[in-house]
Amino acid sequence: MRLNIVEVPSIKIPITSSPGFAKKDLSDFKLDACGLCGFGCRYCSSNSGNYLRINRAMFADLTEQQIGERLLPTDDPALMFIWPDYLDRLRDQLLKKKKEWGQGETLVFSMLTDGFSPHLIKSGTTEKSLRLMLEHTSFRIRVLTKNAIVGTSRWSRFFHEHRDRCVVGLSAGTLDDRWAKRVEVGTPSPTARLNALRKLQDMGVPTYGMLCPIFPDVLEKDQLEKLVDQIRPELVEHVWAEPFNDRQNWRAVRSGYQSGSYGYRWLTDVYEHGQKELWSKYATDLYVRLRDKADREGWLGKLRYLLYEDQITEHDSRMFEGLEGVLLQSNPDSDGKSRNPFLAALQN
C-alpha cells in the first residue's frame, strides 16, 4: 500500500501521561511518534479521537496542499501524518529530565498510533525513539504494535538485549487473514503477528497478549479458544482482551465481511437495527469463555478484560459476578461505581 504522507505540526511535548491506558492497567505514560500511523485499520479509535477531530480542518487543508487531494483519515486508510521535528522535541524533553524519570512506571510506545509503522522504521525514527528512552529514562517500555517485523532477527535481538526494560505485544483480534486484509488495511496478517509474538517468546523476550478487539464472528465454534492458544497465555505476562465497541465506523468494519455472513448480519442487527441487547450478549459470552478458559488453564490472574459496560443488560450482568479479570472502562458515577446499576451492584 502506497502511503499518502503529510507533514503536520508536531505536538509540543512528546511524552505525556496516559490516563486512558492507566485505567486499562497498560501504562502510566505514552509516546506516539506520529500524528496518524501508516496502517489504516478501519476500526481505529484514533480516527474519531480528540487529536484528529480538533485538527480536522487544518489537517485536511495541509493534506490538500501537499498531495493535491482533500482527504480525511476515515476516507483514506493510506493517509499518514508525520511530525518532522518529532525527534528534536523528544530529545529536548528528555535532556531536561533526570535518568531516574519513569522509575517503577510504564510507558507505552505507542498509544494512538503504531510506532512500528514502516515509514517510521525506514526513517530510523522507531529505533531512535526507543534508544533515546532507554538512554535517558528509567521507564519500562511497553511496545504495542501490529507490525510482525518485531519478530525478525534484528528486532528480536534488540528486545532481547533490553529485555529488562521492554515488553512487547502484537495486537490481534481474529485468525481470519483474508478479513483482516480488508479491514486492517496496511498491517501484516494476524498469522504473521502471532508468529512474531511466538518468536519473541522463544528468544526469551517478555511479551503480553493484546486481543483487542475480538470481533463477534470469532465466537463462532472454537475460533476464540484457538486465538487465545496462539498467544501462549502460559508465557505472556498478561492477557488483555476487549469486545468490539462501535466508534462511528461499524460500516467500514462491516464492509470487510461478505454480505449475509455472520459478522455482516451481526453488525447490521446491532448498529443499523438497534438491537443493542445482542452486543450485551456478545460481550458477556466473550468474557465468560475467556474467564472459563483462563480458570481451567491457571492464568485467570493474567486476564484483563476491558469492558465499556453501559449496555450490559440486567440478565447478562449476572455472568460478571465477582468481576474476575474485568476492568470496567465506562466513566464511573460520583461514588466511583459503575453508572450501570447492574454492574454497580457487583462492585465492592
Image (cartoon, grey):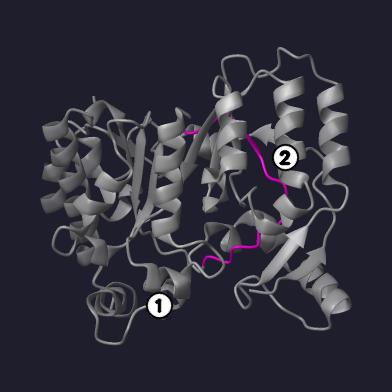
Disc 1 residue type? Gly
Query: Which residue is tagged 1?
Result: 256
Q: Is residue 5 left or right of residue 192?
A: right
Disc assigned to residue 165: none
Residue 86, percent from left and from top: 82, 45
Q: Choose top left, top right, bottom left or bottom right for residue 198.
A: top left
Q: Position of residue 144 (x, y in %)?
A: 53, 43
Is residue 51 something one can see in this rendering?
Answer: yes
How many numbered circles does the render carry? Answer: 2
Q: Is residue 125 left or right of residue 96?
A: left
Residue drawn at point x = 83 percent, y = 78 percent: 67
Magenta-drawn stretch contains 36: yes
Q: Nearer the viewer, mark 2 or mark 1?
A: 2
- Is 242 magenta? The answer is no
| Mark 1 neighbour density, 10 Å: few (under 14) some (14–19) many (20 or more) | some
State the image coordinates of residue 193 (x, y, percent, origin top left).
45, 53
Q: Nearer the viewer, residue 172 or 177?
A: 177
Q: Quadrant of the C terminus?
A: top left
Decide which of tag 2 and tag 1 comes sooner along the chain. 2
Residue 319 lies, with reference to residue 321, above or below; the image says: below
Q: Please indicate, yes or no, whether residue 207 appears anywhere in the rendered image.
A: no
Residue 213 sits above or below residue 176 on the image: above
Q: Which residue is mark 2?
A: 127
Magenta span of residues: 26-41
- Residue type at mark 2 is Glu
Split into 4 quadrants, where in the image is the N terminus? bottom right
Question: Residue at left 46%, top 37%?
Answer: 200
In whole angstroms, how far apart are the C-alphas of marks 2 and 1? 33 Å
**SS class, disc 1:** loop
Spot the residue most to the front. 153
